[in-house]
Amino acid sequence: MRSYLRPAVVIKDGLDVEVRADEMFSPDNTHILDLPEMGGLLECFPNGDSSRFAEAFGIRRTVKSMGRYICRWPGHRAFWEVMAKCGFLSDDPVRVGNCEVSPAAFCAALFGSQKQFFYGEGERDIALVRTDARGLKNGKPWRVVCQVVDRRDLETGLTSMQRTVGFPVSIGARMILDGRLEKKGIVSPDEVPFDEFMGELGRRGITWSRREGPWDGRMEP
């Protein structure tokens, strides 16, 4: 929930453009992504500092446009825009009777204590991780899309969020322990043996797709 009230940075025409925390859900900062594999339309809004990621990947000086986005079902944006602007995600405490209560902590406790917000036995969440890169390759317009779509494993009960967060961390730890990843501390993604890493994810049931081809020059999703 705290990620729903933090400023973002997107790159436009090579320049960093800041998006205020209370503006990330505004219609002007939202675009629509139509993915059949996700069942239809998704609302996408900026979250996080894309300029910092461009620096980590070594492309900050050359990339023209870049954004890091959260994708949600239609209607999500409008609800959380109101919640954020009304102060429900703030950490600043408000007095309730004789107590000081953080609105964000109250919301987390409220959502986390009601059964209607938990998955039922046969219900599944879904996670989307997508990278869409467009530019010139060998002087020609080219586009590469890499994507992971993962769902809750009903056999183990692990949600897709638990799987797509926990498994990569555990794989990285194992790579350090068995010597496949020698660098310690903060490691850039391009320093991790990609094929081995994705192979380990595949053995845990998380697969990825890659498609590439000529790009028509359009910037729309």
Image (cartoon, rainbow, N blue to C red):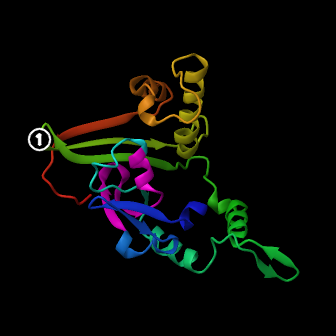
Task: Determine crowd level at label 1: few under 14, some 14-19, many 20+ residues with C-alpha closer than 10 A.
Answer: few
Residue 54: % across, % down? 38, 48
Looking at this view, name the residue that lies furthest to the bottom.
97
Where residue 161 sits: x, y (%)? 55, 46
Query: Can you tell which quarter of the image residue 148 is in?
Result: top left
Q: Which residue does the image show at 55% across and 29% down from the upper left?
A: 172
Quadrant position of residue 84 = bottom right
Q: Which residues are magenta?
A: 30-55
- Residue at image position (62%, 77%) is 87
Residue 86 visible in this rendered orientation of the protein: yes
Please state which of residues 2 and 199 is positioned toward the viewer in this rendering. 2
Q: Is residue 37 magenta?
A: yes
Quarter in which the C terminus is drawn: bottom left
Element type where label 1 sits in the image = loop
| Quadrant (top left, top right, bottom left, bottom right) of the N terminus | bottom right
Vertical placement of 155 versus 91: above or below? above
> Which residue is under mark 1?
139
Type of amino acid at the residue the image marks with label 1:
Gly
Report if residue 1 is visible in the image: no
Residue 207 drawn above or below residue 221: above
Asked if the magenta segment contains residue 119, the reply would be: no
- Please state which of residues 149 and 117 is positioned toward the viewer in this rendering: 149
User: How far across and how far down the image is residue 112, in percent?
Assistant: 70, 60
Percent position of residue 79, x then y: 51, 74
Q: Nearer the viewer, residue 214 or 79?
A: 214
**Which residue is situated farthest in the top direction here?**
178
Task: Out of 108 and 177, give the one closest to the viewer.
Answer: 177
Q: Looking at the image, how many numbered discs can be counted on the residues?
A: 1
Tell me: residue 113, above or below residue 187: below
